[in-house]
Amino acid sequence: MLQITDLHTYYGESHVLQGVTLAAARGTVTAVLGRNGVGKTTLCRSIAGLTPARAGAVVFDGNDITRTPPYRIHDLGISLVPQGRRIFPSLTVQENMAIAVNTTRSQGWDLQKVFAVFPRLAERRQNRGNELSGGEQQMLAIARALVARPTFLILDEPTEGLSPMLVAEVAGVIRRLKDEGTSILLAEQNAAFAVKVADYVHVMSKGVVVHSTDPVALWQNEEVKTQLLGVPAAVSPPNTRPGT
Amino acid sequence: ERPPIKIGFMVPLSGANAQNGRDILNGFLLLLEEAGYQAGGRRIQLIVEDDEGIPAVGLTKARKLVERDQVHMMGGPLLASSAYAIAPYIHAQQIPMVYPVASGDDLTQRRRSKWIVRTGYTSSQPNHPFGEYAYHTLGHRRIATIALDYAFGWESVGGFERTFLEQGGQITKKLWVPLSVHDFAPYLAQVSRDLDAVYVLFIGRTALQFLRQYQEYGLKDRVPVIGMGTTTDEHVLPAMGDEAIGVTTALHYSGALDTPANRTFSAAYRARFKRVPSYYSESMYSGGKWLLTAIEALKGNVENRDVLLDAIRQAQPTGLPRGPVTIDEYGNPVENIYVRRVERVNGVLQNTVIATLPNVSQFWKYNPVDYLKQPLYAR
Amino acid sequence: MTYLITQTLNGLFSAALLFLIASGLTLAFGVMKIVNIAHGSFYMLGVYIAYTVILRTQSLLLGAAAAIVVVSALGFVMQRFFLRRFGNDPLAQMMMTMGFALLFRDATLMIWGGDPFTLQYPGWLRGSMEAGDVVFPYYRLFVIVVAALVGVALWAINEKTLLGARLRATVDDPEMASAMGINVTLLSGLVFAAGAGLAAFGGVMGGPILGGYAGLDFDLLPLAFVVVIVGGMGSLKGAFVGSLVVGMIDNYGKALVPELSYFTLFAPMILVLALKPTGLYGRA
Amino acid sequence: MTASSTAALKLEQVSRHFGGLKAVDGVSLTVQPGERHALIGPNGAGKTTLFNLISGEFPPTSGRVELFGADVTKVPAYKRAALGIARTFQITKLFPALTVRENVLVACTALDRRRLAMHRTVASCTDLRDAADRLLESFGLLPHAAETAKNLSYGDQRKLEVALSMAGRPRLLLLDEPMAGLSAGESRSMHELIDRLDRSIAVLLIEHDMDVAFAFANRVTVLHHGRVLTEGSCDEVSANRSVQQIYLGDAADH
Amino acid sequence: MGARRLTLLVVLALLVIAAPFVLSSYWVGLLTEVAILAILAMSLDVLLGYTGLPSLGHASLFGVAAYAVALLSTRYGMNFWTCVFAGLVVGTLASAVIGLIVSHVRDVYFLMITLAIGMVLWGLSYRWIPVTGGDNGLSGIPSLEVHAGLPFAGPTAFYYVTLVVFALSAGAMVLLVRSPFGLTLRGIRENEGRMKSLGFNTWLHCYLSFIVSGFFASVAGVMWAYYNGFVSPTYLDLTASSELFLMVTLGGPATLVGPVLGAGMIVLLKNVMSAYTARWLLILGTVYIVAILTAPKGVWNLGSRRSA
Ligand SMILES: Nc1ncnc2c1ncn2[C@@H]1O[C@H](COP(=O)(O)OP(=O)(O)OP(=O)(O)O)[C@@H](O)[C@H]1O
Ligand SMILES: Nc1ncnc2c1ncn2[C@@H]1O[C@H](COP(=O)(O)OP(=O)(O)OP(=O)(O)O)[C@@H](O)[C@H]1O
Ligand SMILES: [Mg+2]
Ligand SMILES: [Mg+2]
């Protein structure tokens, strides 16, 4: 569904993505892990068209979207939950979602469904974005992407600032989306969370993918965990799945 | 072959006053073209600078003309503020200069320089006789004034007020309008309808807007408008409509002045620039004649500045479009003042001359020495 | 009483005209944070273009339409090819508009000369209404009504439509807006064009009274800014209230204390900002 | 009462309302000098708002705030900082166009007499520079010292965010989710960093990761709907049934 | 600052000192103008570039100082040092008073409140005729060399005096922006909210910045009054303030060197161009646009990625 080949992205002179290649199949959750500053966000932004790559290709559903402007990429069915929330501060919760709503795709998420998952947002629907708490903003950022009814969803650290209960809620959402056939790219710090929901995991370091495997194998690979993710060896594998 | 005589010239050629500056320059160009850029057997080189209507820029430009271009004599500027600003420099550098338009009274009165010869007029000059005219001939007794709030306005209104009051007239109210005003409604609302007339002083777009709004508020048919000649000067008159008809003003020139000299000038100017000449156009056409006459008299030997200055002051150019002019010992012209009324002739508005007040001096009928002891007209 | 009614009507007229000029400015600022120094130039170009077309065709309507279309197109081009590159640098954008303002100013002088002129009144709006001692020109009444209509229309678009929400989203975070499927480039261009068109429309409406002349641009710019600042940059409601406040104070001020004529325009603004640093309805 | 026993922070019935919403509703809380105190609660419980009231971002609707024994309810933020309180922001607030080092230098001058000095260069204030570099060192940011702050990765920006708050040697530190956005490794070193802080510094920490919160704090306060749900030692709180319900959300919907 | 730029500056400095030996008095005059306006532009840069407070009324502070000198020297015949001192004090006091009103205003609002205050001061200079002489201004200010009793006089002497004043002012401002205080100004520009929570009384810092900037504007104002020998309301008007603004932004805000270049470019460009064409404004507008397109952060920042 999404094929990324030898992607090179720069900020000015600094060469951040140094040849990333990965693929995400339809209806799967692909996680990208790695320590701070390895380029996860940059990868997400390059796919969404916010920081177009200088070399390499992003092909989505057979279309080369490497240099397509962001709004067109969005129209093709790719939605982004950006890092740092980036909701529109002067729009109300309702408006934040309204401008993203996609009416061309007939089925998928709508406001009701979103409010059922995040009741807190329903309570605050007339409040402006800058009046929300950090966690509420994060919920809104996710909700906003959902109502766009994407066929491909990019989640850049969606659990940041969410309480454990909501983290579990988000995990549930991801599974539901997957069941509905939506493909997901998940950039995460929280490796424990990622391995719980992902079908396949890529580990990045210094702008390249250095390790690709399935989640269970990753969790058993102590070397990758400590060196590339910084997860302390002592942490036991996630055996419980809270929530849902 | 002697090197050319250099004449420096500065007026605003950009910004809000550019068109007036351009008109002044055009008058000069016409004169020089008629003379073939030649006088006293020497070629004449004109060096034009844009003073932007900003005094400090004017001074810089004057420095440029004097120090870099080494001009022999100069003409300009348009605005009194620039004129005052460069006067000390001109005086110190001893460059003979004619002021064709700048009309600040003190330029040839309390702060005069012998190096500066004004060939235009002082702000109060047309208004002294006009005050008496308004009282006696027009029969006005109670008048309000509305004028732009700066020295030109104060001096004009001041001159008018002085003679009008001396005759026994009454000024009921003096309204001063900042130059930035576009909507005159707040002022018009203060014009009472039982006045004999309002005296106004406006220039350019303010003249246009004022008369338009004066009519809009139904005042035109109730209270006649008299005023300073700039209000209906030919640079705005073509843009005006019926609202201007009947407005009676005083100035030392009218485009419609029916003399052979003016008819010739007017025809030549229209042919050359496709515009009606205004008093700005005439100003440097005539002002330039003092320079050319002096150059002729000296046979082109303009290198000695004292001699050149004397020659300019002694020049008696004839055939000026505005009529006969002599320069008084203060360096200001003694000339005719015309009372003009706007009429539509052959479908075009013009300032028809309805009276000629001859040989008006900047001191009117007063003794210059006593006159200069009194303060300058102010608000 | 007569006096009060007349001055209030005058104040309303000033406010109406100010609103027409300021709404476009506040729009451009609201959506793109562009402090548009060329806004006065748009107004001026509007008058000049209308004037030219009316001279040729004798049609006021054609003149107005031409002014709006041409100036909007100019605004669009300016935004699209010059301002857009500096989306994240408001200062550069402002300087760019300043450069354009100088360009327009001199180009106007070059094309049309510096002679002042006024536009004609539409025939059916000549004359004035007289009720007792109150005299008020029909045309000014007309301008008041038109400004009110424009205000209502703009408000409805901004607050009640999805387009409005999209606009505000673009203001908040253009990058995210584009990631949400908004064609920010096009939208910004159109909004800037609309702002320019509004200015040109203001020029046409003010044309019969203020006319056109060299220097009109920089005479009006501060007025538009005063209104927008008093109300709060980017707020339509602010522009509306701002023009009322400024129009009234300026009018009454000039009439009641002519001594302070120079200060009636700017002193209220200083007062407002001293007490509320972001204007009446502005957000920091 | 001796000076040492004066509470670092004392809140008495503070409330903050936004329109009809009672974001903080009658909260009383005391933090002793040197105490490690965690503040937890579901999203939107009022934790950040409470921080804002303590640091003086905006005034409370009602109630009283006391810092080190002084009533500061109506005192502006910058004066509270001078009393020895510092905070981090949940949503990063840096000086984006300054270099990382300059970011810290600014923070270091905040409570220094030289902040108004115009007659000497910053470079000549070697002690300031050393202090800044030590701080950067301890956060692992020294390699990035000359970079412009806005070009840092999100995680590094979060670190810088915390570093800024520590520059002024505060006596009371308010940390709003300092680990958020940090990778597991970074998060751990941040944890160690806070743990190593001088024992005289009182720390109030907002954190959603319960493991981290409980490992760090001696006392925990749980906020819910703007009110204190419960307060106590880690064991007490983690044993509390309703805490588990609202926070971990097992089965029950609130 | 790179070595190449430093060399460039040194060479420029030498050229500037040698200028009167090779150039005519007219060019020396222009250079004098540049130097005075450069002080003014740098003073605005402290506010605009470093503190992030864009003032569109800065020329009015400069004008106030110039008026003080003009008034005292022409009306009251005060001696040189009194006039200079009074010019600086009055200008600085004016900024201290205005600063009280504007120091808590930011961004566009700052732009506009300073514009408004500039307009009010301009109105005052225009309307307070007994003191200011109205639109014609005050003239007859004695030449600086004579007034100060210097043994030499003329454009060259004035030029060197200006250079000394320029060097002192520039040195002081360079030190200022590199001082801890200067750093706090940049902090405020970047994120004022954070500055507050770090413990800075940001109002005070902005206020001081405004006063300091006003002081150096006054230095320029005093020099300008002596240079021209007259003062007029156009010193304070919006055109003057916006031209100043252009100098800073064109040259490069937050660099101090940039505004000097900006002042030089604009003064020279205007004077050279207007000698050849009346359409110089058109050209100037185009030059601005091209300059911003190629160097949006100012000419001095061309090719450097670091903008302080
Ligand atoms: N706007 C920018 N300009 C220059 N460099 C940048 C910019 N944004 C990010 N970088 C650099 O690019 C690199 C990758 O950053 P990126 O944000 O993609 O990392 P990340 O993997 O998402 O990290 P994190 O987990 O902290 O979010 C970092 O070294 C960062 O410093
Ligand atoms: N300025 C404001 N106007 C209106 N409501 C606000 C404002 N600020 C916060 N709120 C509301 O107050 C409540 C508490 O917000 P606060 O930011 O304190 O939550 P929090 O406990 O920090 O949550 P989180 O864990 O998600 O960061 C939220 O519901 C939020 O929407
Ligand atoms: Mg990231
Ligand atoms: Mg929070």
Image (cartoon, coloured by chain):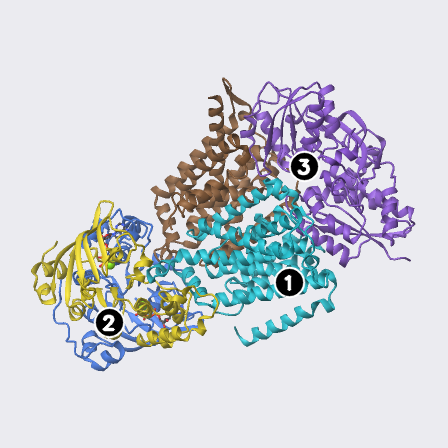
Q: Considering the numbered disc 2 on the image, is that residue within a helix, a strand or a loop?
A: helix
In the image, the residue with mark 1 has its CB under 8 Å from the nearest atom of ligand 1 = no
B196 sits to left or right of B253: left
Q: How far apart are marks 3 and 1 (CA)?
A: 36 Å
Quadrant for residue C219, please give it: top right
C54 sits to left or right of B270: left
Q: Name the residue under label 3.
A: B152
Q: How far apart are marks 1 and 2 (CA)?
A: 56 Å
Image coords of residue B131 (percent x, y): 71, 25
* Rendered colour, chain B: purple
Image coords of residue E95 (percent x, y): 50, 52
Chain shown cyan: that is E
Image coords of residue B224 (percent x, y): 65, 22
| Badge 3: residue crowd in 10 Å (few <14, some 14–19, many ≥20) | many
In the rendered structure, which amino acid carries the disc numbered 2? Ile
Judge whether residue E127 can be spotted in this image.
yes
Chain shown blue: that is A
Q: How far apart are marks 3 and 2 (CA)?
A: 75 Å
Q: Mark 1 points at which residue?
A: E162
B98 sits to left or right of A167: right
* Rendered colour, chain D: yellow
In the rendered structure, which amino acid carries the disc numbered 1? Thr
In the image, the residue with mark 3 has its CB under 8 Å from the nearest atom of ligand 2 = no
* Rendered colour, chain C: brown
